[in-house]
Image (cartoon, rainbow, N blue to C red):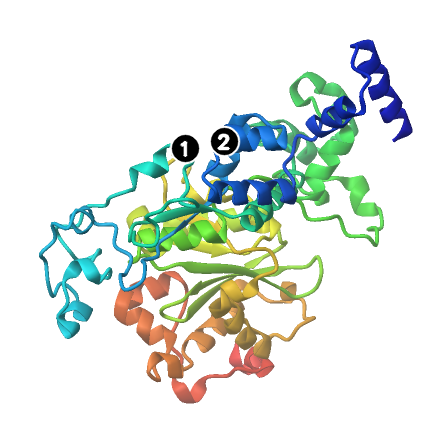
């Protein structure tokens, strides 16, 4: 710190400005990232209708920096005002709507459509209207004098939310691998065939330096984290070595995978597409480093699928969705899996490979829960309790086959639920989508008096 201070003092004297004020301003300008205090200042001054230039001068920042900060971290809220519900219909905004009794709420209370706010999805005259003030500075409603009487979608800048979003993006940008999907495919095409033919990573690194352009240590990291087609078992020397006690940290394939796919983005997507139902994804571990289950939970039907994976890597999840996509046909897959909600595990860190098929066609949308927030997909988590009744914690999933896992899920999905009107998830799903699709999932209906939800299910008599 003393060296930095003296260097700044020397530079200030050299330029003919040895004052302490100059040095303080110089130090402040070297801080490129905004702090929570700076964001709080922005929020307060936006409430006072201050311009970006005035706020920038106050924080010693360029006005474009303040503008980008506000636009990148503003929150959109679909809230009405006192005595009026949210309604962004152009006709309602212009007081030109005379529609009545569009939805059940309007019919029951005999109220006009413009005062309801629930008729948007069913009214044929609906035209979305966005406030033009949000497309120009200051881009938010913090100082808008009409916000207490406005029923349109509003945008706000809040320092606490902006700081949290900034910290999340910063944390994720510093994790994972600094390699694109295209570069990873190229490396895989060069390294994996040679590894399978018995060559060592050291030999590959020095013999194909111009093609690989990665260090030997980096290649080992990629192989150990399952990013290549070749695995540790393809390296004879690695097989003979005893594994280290410390488990390598799980790293994300795409370190920016959560950008545009956060839980807030998920809630907004559901508001814009109310007819879409999400499928919740999760992983169930047996023992550390062993085989795992990928579970897919249908919330409305309470049906859950489970797929056995040899390891908890991203490629095994991609392979399962590729197989489902081919088996079910693209049109059926898009209808059954329109929206996916997963946690922040590294096995779900390659969303593009799941969202798009090999021809680049969009087949689903994927979003992520907030970190350490399993309560945001409670249906999936609660259904895991039934899996644990049959396969307790600490039991290696590797001792089971996919046929046994399918049998377990058939028993679980045939179990009647009070929340489904004493119907089973199997019956509800079959009524909505047909039993043919359940056959694709390898699920069968188990009679009520034959359902077993204990480890006895896997006795020889039940296999």
| Residue 443 seen in render | yes
Mark 1 vs 2: CB contact within 8 A: yes
Q: Nearer the viewer, residue 251 or 429?
A: 251
Furthest-right residue in this view: 2
x, y percent for residue 385: 56, 75
| Residue 198 seen in render | no
x, y percent for residue 299: 40, 67
Q: Is 301 located above or below residue 149 in the figure?
A: below
Classify the position of the N terminus by image quarter: top right
The disc, 1 or 2, on the residue closer to the chain's N-terminal end is: 2
**Badge 1: how crowded within 10 Å, few (<14), some, or many (20+)?**
few
Q: Quadrant of residue 426?
A: bottom left
Q: Nearer the viewer, residue 59 or 31?
A: 59
User: Which disc number belongs to residue 26?
Assistant: none
Q: Nearer the viewer, residue 356 or 165?
A: 165
> Image point 32% across, 59% down: which residue?
81
Q: Is 129 located above or below residue 138 in the figure?
A: below
Q: Quadrant of residue 3?
A: top right
Mark 2 element type: helix
> Image point 50% across, 31% down: which residue?
52
x, y percent for residue 237: 81, 40
User: Which disc number belongs to residue 137?
Assistant: 1
Q: CA distance from mark 1 to mark 2?
A: 8 Å
Mark 1 element type: loop
Furthest-bottom residue in this view: 449
- The residue identified by callout 2 is 52
Q: Quadrant of residue 84?
A: bottom left
x, y percent for residue 46: 48, 41
> Image point 36% across, 45% down: which residue?
363
């Amino acid at each position: 710190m003393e060296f930095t201070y003296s260097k700044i003092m020397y530079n200030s004297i050299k330029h003919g400005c040895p004052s302490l004020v100059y040095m303080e301003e110089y130090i402040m300008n070297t801080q490129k990232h905004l702090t929570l205090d700076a964001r709080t200042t922005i929020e307060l001054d936006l409430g006072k209708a201050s311009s970006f230039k005035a706020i920038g001068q106050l924080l010693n920042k360029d006005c474009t920096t303040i503008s980008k900060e506000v636009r990148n971290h503003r929150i959109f809220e679909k809230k009405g005002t006192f005595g009026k519900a949210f309604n962004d219909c152009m006709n309602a905004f212009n007081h030109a709507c005379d529609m009545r009794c569009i939805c059940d709420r309007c019919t029951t209370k005999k109220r006009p459509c413009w005062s309801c706010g629930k008729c948007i999805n069913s009214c044929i005259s609906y035209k979305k209207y966005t406030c033009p003030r949000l497309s120009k500075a200051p881009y938010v409603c913090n100082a808008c004098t009409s916000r207490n009487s406005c029923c349109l979608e509003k945008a706000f800048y809040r320092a606490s939310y902006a700081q949290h979003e900034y910290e999340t993006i910063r944390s994720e940008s510093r994790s994972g691998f600094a390699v694109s999907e295209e570069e990873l495919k190229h490396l895989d095409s060069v390294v994996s065939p040679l590894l399978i033919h018995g060559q060592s990573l050291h030999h590959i690194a020095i013999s194909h330096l111009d093609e690989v352009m990665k260090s030997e240590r980096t290649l080992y990291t990629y192989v150990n984290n399952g990013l290549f087609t070749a695995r540790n078992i393809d390296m004879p020397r690695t097989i003979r070595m005893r594994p280290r006690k410390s488990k390598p940290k799980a790293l994300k394939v795409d370190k920016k995978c959560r950008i545009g796919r956060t839980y807030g983005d998920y809630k907004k997507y559901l508001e814009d597409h109310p007819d879409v139902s999400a499928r919740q994804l999760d992983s169930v571990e047996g023992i550390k480093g062993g085989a795992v289950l990928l579970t897919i939970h249908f919330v409305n039907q309470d049906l859950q699928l489970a797929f056995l994976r040899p390891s908890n890597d991203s490629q095994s999840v991609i392979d399962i969705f590729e197989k489902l996509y081919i088996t079910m046909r693209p049109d059926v897959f898009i209808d059954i899996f329109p929206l996916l909600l997963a946690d922040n595990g590294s096995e779900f860190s390659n969303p593009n490979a799941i969202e798009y098929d090999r021809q680049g066609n969009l087949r689903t949308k994927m979003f992520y829960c907030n970190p350490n927030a399993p309560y945001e997909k409670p249906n999936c988590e609660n259904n895991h309790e039934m899996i644990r009744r049959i396969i307790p914690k600490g039991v290696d999933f590797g001792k089971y086959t996919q046929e046994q896992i399918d049998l377990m899920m058939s028993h679980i999905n045939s179990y009647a639920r009070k929340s489904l009107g004493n119907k089973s998830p199997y019956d509800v799903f079959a009524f909505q989508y047909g039993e043919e699709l359940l056959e694709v999932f390898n699920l069968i209906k188990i009679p009520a008096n034959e359902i077993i939800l204990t480890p006895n299910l896997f006795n020889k008599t039940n296999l």
